[in-house]
Structures are given as C-alpha cells and as structure tokens.
Image: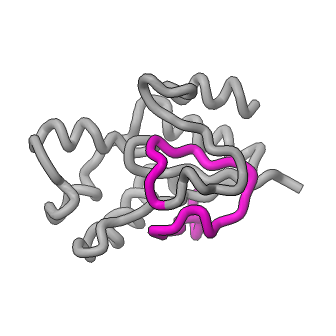
Amino acid sequence: MKKILYIDMDGVLVDYNAMAEKYSGDIDWLPGTFANMEPVDGAIEAFNTLAEHYDVYILSTAPWSNESAWSEKIGWVKKHLGHNARKRLILSHHKNLCSGDYLIDDRPNNGAEKFTGEWLHFGPGNKYPDWDSVLKYLL
C-alpha cells in the first residue's frame, strides 16, 4: 500500500510569489489570478514522479471571498497536471483534518503545522528549498 502524500498548491506547485510580486500586493481577490499562474520550477515533473511512488493529493486553500479562485484552481490542476491529478484536488481551510504520511507546504497556516504526518516545509530558506531536495528525501 502506497503512503499518502499531500502537496500544497500556492508557493509549492504554483509560483504564487512571482504573481504577487508582479501585482505588488494582495492578489487573492483578482479574478483570473489563479488560472494564469505558472508552475514552480520542477513542480510538474516532481508531481508526476511522486505519483508513481505515493498516493498523491493536492491539498490547497482558496480565498473564501473569491469564488472564482476555487474553480480556477481546478482548471490549473487539469491544465498542468492532467491525468495523475484527476479527482485528487482537496480544497480546505483545515489541512490538519486530512490524514496522511506527508504534507509538502510552504507555510504553517490553515492547519499545516498541526498535520499529523510529517510536514515538509518547502521553499527558499526552509529545510526543503526546492523540488530536488524533496525528491531526494522522499525517494
């Protein structure tokens, strides 16, 4: 039986920070923002590789007051991840309610710090600064 792995979207799969820098501020409320973001370097390849070894899910949060962000995230997953991510997107403001072995997330917010499995703190300056370090650890 494969171990369960959750991967956050914003800042982990999706280059949220580049879009935030481009618009200099809070982009959570801009329509179309989430649909137009680019993947983090190495994220697509890493997701597909991890899907061969783990039961992988995308565990993300969407702004409560931006209803279009919810559907845009589904569209992004379909566009960039395809079949390996089919029906594997979970949107929740309480990530700690999902049980599994690993969570890759760039922030402790929305229950990530309370996740019952192992939290892999992703991003520059963290223990897992990029996808190469994550793959080295998990594979």
Q: Which residue shows up at 57% across the image and 44% down it?
A: 104
As for residue 108 lying within the magenta part, the answer is yes
| Camera-nearest residue between 70 and 99 | 99
| Camera-nearest residue between 64 and 135 | 64
59 over 120 or under it: above or below? below
Q: Which residue shows up at 54% across the image and 29% down it?
A: 131
| Left or right of 83, for residue 40 | left
Q: Quadrant of the N terminus?
A: bottom right
Residue 38 found in image quarter: top left
Q: Residue furthest right?
A: 1
| Left or right of 81, for residue 64 | left
Which segment did they paint magenta? 85-110
Q: Which residue shows up at 62% across the image and 53% down it?
A: 6
Residue 82 percent across, percent down from the top left? 52, 56
Residue 117 percent across, percent down from the top left? 72, 51
17 over 26 or under it: above or below? above
| Viewer can see residue 92 | yes
Residue 129 percent across, percent down from the top left? 49, 25
133 over 63 or under it: above or below? above
